[in-house]
Amino acid sequence: MNIPLTWQKSSFSGGSDGNNCLELASTPTTLHLRESDTPATILTTTPTPLAHLLTRIRTDAPTHQSP
């Protein structure tokens, strides 16, 4: 059974219906992310890996070090 997703965009995206924002939908176990200008491309993850990614971005830590 497919659960229909309810997409939400950030309040930082402004009030227009333009296609220039990141949208988020969630189910009890997953998070779904997409860009409004390419809604058919959806990234699906769980909260823990996404939290790790956001922490890494916020602290500006490199994700890959060259040898």
Image (cartoon, helix red, strand yellow):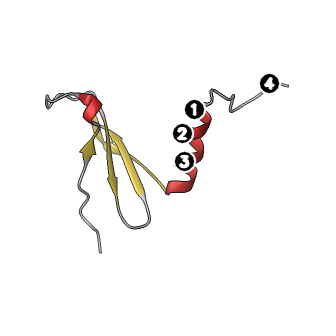
Residue at position x 56%, y 55% in the image: 48
Write down the residue under mark 4: 66
**Crowdedness near tag 4: few (<14), some (14–19) or many (≥20) residues, C-alpha within 10 Å:** few
**Crowdedness near tag 2: few (<14), some (14–19) or many (≥20) residues, C-alpha within 10 Å:** few
The residue at the far right in this view is: 67
What secondary structure is found at the residue carrying circle 1?
A: helix
Find residue 29 and report its horizontal and vertical position in percent: 44, 66
Q: Earlier in the sequence, mark 3 or mark 4?
A: 3
Locate residue 27: give its quadrant.
bottom left
Write down the residue under mark 2: 54
Tell me the amino acid under the disc marked 2: Leu
State the CA–CA distance, disc 4 to disc 1: 18 Å
Q: 42 or 6, which lies in front?
A: 6
Residue at position x 62%, y 36% in the image: 56
Q: Find out whether the residues at labels 4 and 1 contact each other: C-beta distance under 8 Å.
A: no
Image: 32 above or below 4: above
Q: Find out whether the residues at labels 3 and 2 contact each other: C-beta distance under 8 Å.
A: yes
State the CA–CA distance, disc 4 to disc 2: 22 Å
Tell me the amino acid under the disc marked 1: Ile
State the CA–CA distance, disc 3 to disc 4: 24 Å
Find residue 38 and report its horizontal and vertical position in percent: 29, 36
Write down the residue under mark 3: 51
State the CA–CA distance, disc 3 to disc 2: 5 Å
Q: Earlier in the sequence, mark 1 or mark 3?
A: 3
Q: Earlier in the sequence, mark 4 or mark 2?
A: 2
- Mark linked to residue 57: 1
**Crowdedness near tag 3: few (<14), some (14–19) or many (≥20) residues, C-alpha within 10 Å:** few
Image: 17 above or below 52: above
